[in-house]
Amino acid sequence: MKLDRAAQPPSTPADCECDVLVIGSGVGGLSAALTAGLRGLQTIVAEKADVYGGTSIWSGGWIWIPCNDMAQRDEVDDSLDKARLYLRERLGPQYDPALVDAYLEAGPRMLREYARETPVQFEPAGYIFPDYHPETPGSLHGAGQSRSLRPVAFNGRQLSRDTARNMRPMLRQLTLSGMLIGSLVEAQHFINASRSLTSARYVLRKTLRYIADRIRYGRDMSLVNGMALIARHVSGLERLGVPIWVGAPAVELIVEGGEVRGAVLEQRGKRIHVRTNRGVVLACGGFPHDEQRKSKFYSHVAAGAQHYGIAPPTNTGDGLTLGERAGGSVVEGRPWNCLFMPASRIPGTSVIPAVFPHIWDRSKPGFIAVTPDGRRFVNEAAPYMMFGQAMVDASQGKADVRAWLICDHAAIHRYGLGLARPMLPLWPHLRSGYLVSGPTIDDLARRIAVPEETLRTTIAEYNEDARRGVDTKFGKGADPFSRFQGDPDVKPNPNMAPLAQGPYFAVEIFCADFGTFTGLRTNAHAQVLDRETGEPIRGLYAAGNDMAMMMGSHSVGGGITLGPAMVFGYIAACHLAARSSLDEAAHCA
């Protein structure tokens, strides 16, 4: 059964059987489906949206897998004991030995199997991607020391036409006029294109390839980052004949005798009962657009603050609701429940999410972030999780959780600011109100309603530190992760330069997230646990953001959302394959 001929459920709503039903098509669900398919299990992926890929397709595609074969080959100084130490020190009371051991032991095995049997391939970065907390025992940092891997770029032309058509498009605000930028190295070429012949040639070649793809396919087919990650999984499913049914949300689970035996899907008003011989994997992407759960789990939202989910609008907590109705429970009591991301609002659009995630610009020289009172509150180059936490903490419980990201003319010309791209006209963003500008610091302060004297003092103190290359308040540029995101051509601190050349620019940023951490309680096999007995609910598994994050409330390195999503999807499928078939296997035509 070819995927491009099975992208929709059967036309008649008769009962249908398979071995494994995966609900959701982010990387957690696709990993479960791919692993089940490799083991000969008849598998179906059901996706609520009309396109597949979930939030994962919008991500950087990185996974955090200690002691992987590539690291061992490159003589990275790592061990499972060292990784356990790092996680134990960072997670503290939220450290679960069984979940951690399952993850650390299965991760390298998964990568080995995928490299051998599937198109899912990863590579170490060509530059340093250190753990986020280099001061913590067990962390990896320094030249060539990394636990993070990125997906190998993928030629989207290898997918069938229907499969490619059903892929979720990339967030346009994360592209360069539709062109996909795959890494910091590529971004640096674009930054240096007007000053380096090598970079100019690189940019020209990439632009010409992109133009050719736009003419022939209507989109960039040189897939990188999260798009490469998803496309590689889907290519593997296509080879195995595993279908992805798009536009087919699960509305209820089929539970018989305390055991999950399938699910009811709905499409165009028709209900389709899919019965399973082995089980169901919930991988619906958490609850980034479930306002009720956000108010419950985010204190700043409960206080009235705005919070945006950088996720498809269909991610409304369906997996958690289905799991709870089957007897599972959602983990509570964690201090932080999402992967924070500072983001600016895009004016004049109703598209969700209408925000721009500030991943890299805030780390570059010539940028500072201030609260509405005009004071810095964080190392601007900190991991986005820590940046978001600092925004919430700086609000001191008020509903006004926001900040201003400010730069001077030299910085915005070289690096851009949010939607405003380097060396491109700024007037559209100034006219829309996305950017605010002032010829002097005082003028800018008045226009963004920040105390003039305070902002003037803040920038003067920062500029003095920048000239010396030492951030005396927050240590910007003092750690490997900050420096990794800076501009290596700027000395002595790649993250700092004075804001000295007017006019000055600002964009307002708010709290957002790239994924929720709070999910269903599971065991080390990814089985959902019964809230009354604590025993596994037979036939029900969770992966991705539907599973309570094994990292607790912590972000320890690049790829700590996608890594566990993939690995526990893999673990769930391995456990399903080891189960005895409940009935004689049947197949869905």
Image (tube, rainbow, N blue to C red):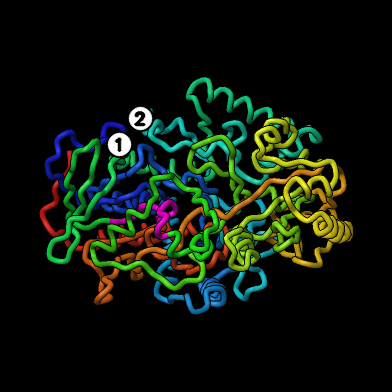
Tell me where the magenta segment starts and ends, as one range: 281-293
User: Residue at horizontal 49%, vertical 25%?
Assistant: 218
The amino acid beneath tag 1 is Leu
Q: Where is residue 253 in the image (x, y as percent from the top left)?
A: 21, 55
Residue 166 in which image quadrant: top left
On residue 3, which mark appears? 1
Q: Where is residue 69 in the image (x, y as percent from the top left)?
A: 51, 59
Number of residues whose C-alpha sits closer than 10 Å to that of mark 2, classed few (under 14), some (14–19) or many (20 or more): few
Q: Where is residue 132 in the image (x, y as percent from the top left)?
A: 62, 64
In the image, taking residue 313 as reference, residue 373 lies left or right, namely: right
Is residue 283 within the magenta segment?
A: yes
User: Residue at horizontal 72%, vertical 64%?
Assistant: 479
Work out whether residue 261 or residue 578 is closer to the camera in this orientation and state it. Answer: 261
Is residue 466 visible in this depiction of the protein?
Answer: no
In the image, taking residue 393 as reference, residue 276 lies left or right, namely: left
Work out whether residue 482 or residue 358 is closer to the camera in this orientation and state it. Answer: 358
User: Residue at horizontal 62%, vertical 25%?
Assistant: 208
Number of residues whose C-alpha sits closer than 10 Å to that of mark 1, classed few (under 14), some (14–19) or many (20 or more): many
Lower position in the chain sequence, tag 2 or tag 1? 1
Mark 1 secondary-structure assignment: helix
Chief SS of the magenta region: loop
On residue 67, which mark appears? none
User: Residue at horizontal 79%, vertical 35%?
Assistant: 196
Judging by the rendered image, the residue that carries numbered circle 2 is: 162
State the separation of the CA atoms marked 2 and 1.
8 Å
Is residue 368 within the magenta segment?
A: no
**Which quadrant, please, contains the C terminus?**
top left
Mark 2 in CB contact with mark 1 (< 8 angstroms): yes
In the image, taking residue 440 as reference, residue 131 lies left or right, namely: left
The amino acid beneath tag 2 is Asp
Residue 113 versus residue 501 in the image, above or below: below
